[in-house]
Amino acid sequence: MSACDFFSEHDKDIIYMCPFNGALKGKVFITNYRLYFKSADADPAVTLNVPLGVIGRVEKMGGASSRGENSYGLDITCKDMRNLRFALKQEGHSRRDIFDILFRYAFPVSHGLVSTPTSFLKPPTESQLQILSLIGCLSTGPQGLPNEKWRITFVNETYELCDTYPTILAVPFRSSDEDLRKVSAFRSRGRIPVLSWIHRENQAVICRCSQPLVGMSGKRNKDDERYLDLIREANGTAKLTIYDARPSVNAVANKATGGGYEGDDAYQNAELVFLDIHNIHVMRESLKKLKDIVYPNVEESHWLSSLESTHWLEHIKLVISGAIQVADKISGGNSVVVHCSDGWDRTAQLTSLAMLMLDGHYRTLRGFQVLLEKEWISFGHKFASRIGHGDKNHADQDRSPIFVQFIDCVWQMTKQFPTAFEFNERLLVTILDHLFSCRFGTFLYNCESARDTNVRSKTVSLWSLVNSEASSYQNPFYTPECSRVLYPVASMRHLELWVTYYIRWNPRIRQQQSPVEQRYMELLALRDEYLKKLEELQLTDSSPNSSHLSNSSTPNAASPTQHITHLHTPF
């Protein structure tokens, strides 16, 4: 147990039904933060350290009449691609106690408990505040705004315009705050088109929003049409390209519920492109199928066909392909608007991936934190609803692995461009682990307005941890190329299953460190060793005795330091 655990609630003898090592006797400890198991008879000991936020479902296994060995206990479904099964003795209601405690603290929201990680209530650290203090201006990107084409507006300062947007927005210079209010009435959830990123040279922009409220009757809104024309005119684009992330059939179907898309007749200076990325329900089922084939055992005999049947990599391909289209259009000097239905799922995937391709700043360790804070956290990706933090309703139709899918896309890019990213795979896995853990306030709640009220000043940010251990998350092969645009290959032949994340719980499938990376780390260690010896020699050389000997030596004699300083080892 550590400082993260507020108090220990339960410890009991139990049998862990390990899918890899068989039945293991041991003790389980449950606090308000984690479930911890340690085996008693295995050598080496098998341990489990599971944050309760990772738990998605707890079910009782067997009943009073169960007679099979180890058939009475608990089944625990986790959100991080694993399941846990524990067996207990039937006497003394041993299962009831552990079930009640686990159910209560794994799902605090469902039990009316404080949903923020109260065991970590601390003032924000300096590294956290450095990120958080930038949130307002980050909403506009690091582009030196305002300028003669774009302005900063505080019309959403009290979240009246849109309660899922940040308080500070960048909008066309020629639009008034009253224009924004009129446009807000015609966009789903009030999520108007606002600036996400601007190209420093050609001034082409990425704007993001939600679908227009066209409906079955084909309603029009002159203010919305004029507003999109102002975005187009900001850099003189002949035609504004609107990327609708949805399949066209879904966009048409959304008309029945009051939504829709920008028709050619109303938006004559715009080109509409559908990207055919499926909705949250399709992605949820796809990841479920993937979990079925990788945990607890990998289906070896029909692996390729089984993987194909999940359609997971196919969805990854479509998301990356859509982002490439956005980045390519921007590179060509044409401004774009990106949206899906409500503008907080597929939209965030596309804008942030396109910005990773276009801007080397976001490929640095700090820049990637800025990207997540800006495009996902500030602009209201529904983390609480999509992950189900502290909620027992595991069948909630709002659950979906949209953010996991985005991080997978980033990983695919790091594989194709191994020197372009300052951060490594460990950072991506750490982010996903704490997406579920609820240890930090970073991913709690659905939007900034809720976060400001509940967690902003009360919890520590994930970036405090990351920045305090920055060297652990750095890519040793990183070569800064800020102006280089990355175009990954969005082909099934070039996409891989992220084994070190999806199959990491299987001890029989170990991802080997690349020989080049291993050799590089060895050379870095060797360099540090030589530098230490050099420092010792310099200290010895500067001592009084050494100075006396040096003065008594001949003028032509070279000191050890003089020899060493001429050696340059290229690491």
Image (cartoon, helix red, strand yellow):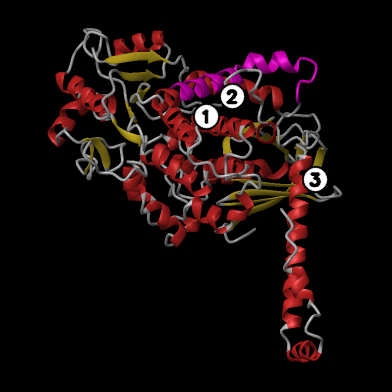
Q: Is the C-beta separation of discs 1 and 3 under 8 Å?
A: no
In the image, 8 versus 98, the foreground residue is: 8
Q: Taking 116 as reference, is 559 above or below it?
A: below
Which residue is denoted by mark 3 in the rendering? 25
Residue 489, given in percent of the width and then of the height, sits at 58, 22
Q: Which stretch appears magenta? A: 298-325
Task: Tell me, yes or no, if residue 533 can be seen here.
Answer: no
Amino acid on which disc 3 is placed: Lys
What crowding class fits label 3: few (fewer than 14 Cα within 10 Å), some (14-19), or many (20 or more)?
Answer: many
Residue 560, given in percent of the width and then of the height, sits at 79, 75
The nearer-to-camera label among 1 and 3 is 1
Residue 287, which numbered label?
2
Name which of mark 2 and mark 3 comes first in the sequence: 3
Residue plotted at (65% across, 58% down): 1
For residue 62, which quarter of the picture?
Answer: top right
Determine if the magenta segment contains residue 33.
Answer: no
Residue 455, given in percent of the width and then of the height, sits at 39, 51
Q: Is the C-beta separation of discs 2 and 3 under 8 Å?
A: no
Name which of mark 1 and mark 3 comes first in the sequence: 3
**SS for callout 3:** strand
Residue 561, given in percent of the width and then of the height, sits at 75, 74
Amino acid on which disc 1 is placed: Pro
In the image, 174 versus 13, the foreground residue is: 174
C-alpha distance separating marks 2 and 3: 32 Å
Amino acid on which disc 2 is placed: Leu
Residue 401, which numbered label?
1
Q: Main secondary structure of the magenta part?
A: helix
Q: Taking 253 as reference, is 446 above or below it?
A: below
For residue 404, which quarter of the picture?
Answer: top right
